[in-house]
Amino acid sequence: MLHIIWILCSLSLIFFIILHNPKSQNIGNQNQFFGTTRSAEENINKITWTLVVIFFLLAICLSTSNME
């Protein structure tokens, strides 16, 4: 079960990192999806950092559970 959550987290993290890149082609219109440009950037940053923390916590949990 943790493997599935870890994979979904990693795919979501890739998506939000691509969305955050200012040189990328905007996927959809992020201004309409997140509100203003400033709040969009803040929301994308919060989501990205949350996914990073979850990803690494799950990586640690999965690596310690495999050692036993």
Image (cartoon, rainbow, N blue to C red):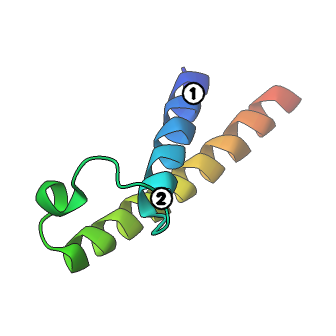
Q: Which residue is mark 1?
A: 2
Q: Residue at x 79, y 38 (%)?
A: 64
Left or right side of 36 for 64: right
* Observer able to see residue 60: yes
Q: Is residue 38 above or below residue 67?
A: below
Question: What percent of the width, then of the height, locates residue 44?
Answer: 35, 63
Query: Is disc 1 placed on a helix, strand or loop?
Result: helix
The image shows residue 42 at horizontal and vertical percentages of 31, 74
Identify the amino acid type marked 1: Leu
Q: Is residue 34 above or below residue 1?
A: below
Tell me which corner region of the image, top left, top right, bottom left or bottom right, holds residue 26: bottom left
Q: Name the spot of residue 29 as percent of width and height, x first.
A: 21, 54
- Alpha carbon separation for disc pair 1 and 2: 31 Å
User: How many discs mark residues in the rendered view?
Assistant: 2
Up-down relation of residue 63 to residue 46 (above or below):
above
> Which mark is drawn over residue 27?
none
Q: Residue at x 55, y 58 (%)?
A: 53
Q: Is residue 27 above or below residue 24?
A: above
Is residue 68 visible in the rendered structure shown here?
no
The kind of residue tagged 2 is Ser
Mark 2 surroundings: few (<14), some (14-19) or many (≥20) residues within 10 A: few
Q: Secondary structure at mark 2?
A: loop
Q: Nearer the viewer, mark 1 or mark 2?
A: 2
| Residue hosting label 2 | 24
Q: Quadrant of residue 22?
A: bottom left
- Using residue 63 as the reference point, say whether residue 3 is left or right of it: left
Residue at the image position 23 percent from the left and 80 percent from the top: 38
Q: Can you name the residue that lies furthest to the bottom here?
A: 38
Closer to the camera, 14 or 59?
A: 14
